[in-house]
Amino acid sequence: MPHWVSTHYIEPHFLRNALDVLIIGTGTAGLSAALALGRARRSAIVFDIDNHRGRLHETTSQVISKSIHDETIAEIKTKFKTIMFSRAIAASVREKGIVFEVEVVTGRCWKERKVILAMSSHDVLPDIPGGEEAWGKNIFDVSKCLDVSKKATADAAVLITSDSPNSGFKIDNRPIKSLESSGTSVAVQFADGAESVYSLIAHKPRKVISGPLAEQLDLEMTSEGKVLVENEFQETSTRGVFAMGDSAGFLIEESAGASAGWLAGVGANLQIAEDDMNM
């Protein structure tokens, strides 16, 4: 987990007791934003919001290892003394005048001029008994998995939980009673008593942004439940708030999050400079 960095090196700002930027999320997107702000000598603190609950299995592509993640944090701490990391978890955020106030679970309140949301998302699986146990073993989001090509797939199926046009599949509308994984295959028990066995079931679960912060800031959302961003700098409908990664990205991939995080950091820096010129 991230650790505190001494604030001794952070220069005081004319906005008393306010840091330049708050970053919520310690994933690739959040760290990339912190790196961009560190290079610009902006003061920032990085909070977490969850324990990466969306990682239900370890076959997802482009997920950096914990060692690389920890090394990146250590390097940012060493190179950029204006960037802090906190063990505390952000519980709430609100806009108050020209700053934002964030309260952590311990009750401490922090003030920042800009907010960057880089929260993770978590998978919401269908409420089918046995589904969570089979996830990552015989049921995969095939758009994000590395080892599916190695599995024997003489019999495969797609689990569809929303209205979808017929794309060449044979549709079976029978209600599913339960799923049972047996190592190399998964048995689908239907409500009518019938059973079908497949080597692989493909399913793209619904993603939900972790935490209530986007809702607390009253941000405009997309129809898919993501934060709507308005330009390449990841600006949201509320000035001073930026979002990227799982919170706003079309692709939930580490490389895409890193790129968007850097742009959000640049955008926050430019917006602060613009604000200072107008004061």
Image (cartoon, rainbow, N blue to C red):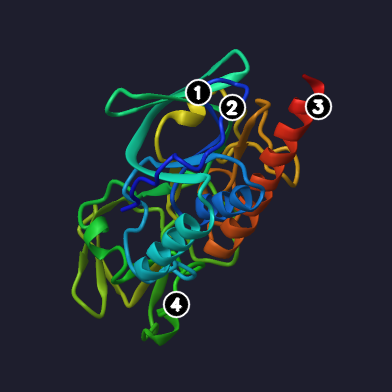
Give neighbour class at mark 1: few <14, some 14-19, many 20+ (Cα, 10 Å): few
Dot 3 corresponds to which residue?
Answer: 277
Horizontal side of 21 relative to 171 (left or right) equals right
- Give the amino acid at mark 1: Asn
Dot 1 corresponds to which residue?
Answer: 17
Tell me the distance, in whole angstroms, between the alpha carbons under discs 2 and 4.
34 Å
Report the disc number at residue 219: 2
Q: Quadrant of the C terminus?
A: top right
Q: Is residue 182 above or below residue 132?
A: below
Query: Which numbered disc, 3 or 1, marks the residue that appears first in the sequence?
Result: 1
Query: Which numbered disc, 4 or 1, marks the residue that appears first in the sequence?
Result: 1
In the picture, residue 187 is in which quadrant? bottom left
Tell me the distance, in whole angstroms, between the alpha carbons under discs 3 and 2.
26 Å
Percent position (x, y) of residue 161?
43, 49
Give neighbour class at mark 3: few <14, some 14-19, many 20+ (Cα, 10 Å): few
- Give the amino acid at mark 4: Leu
Q: Residue at (38%, 79%) from the top-left corner?
A: 155
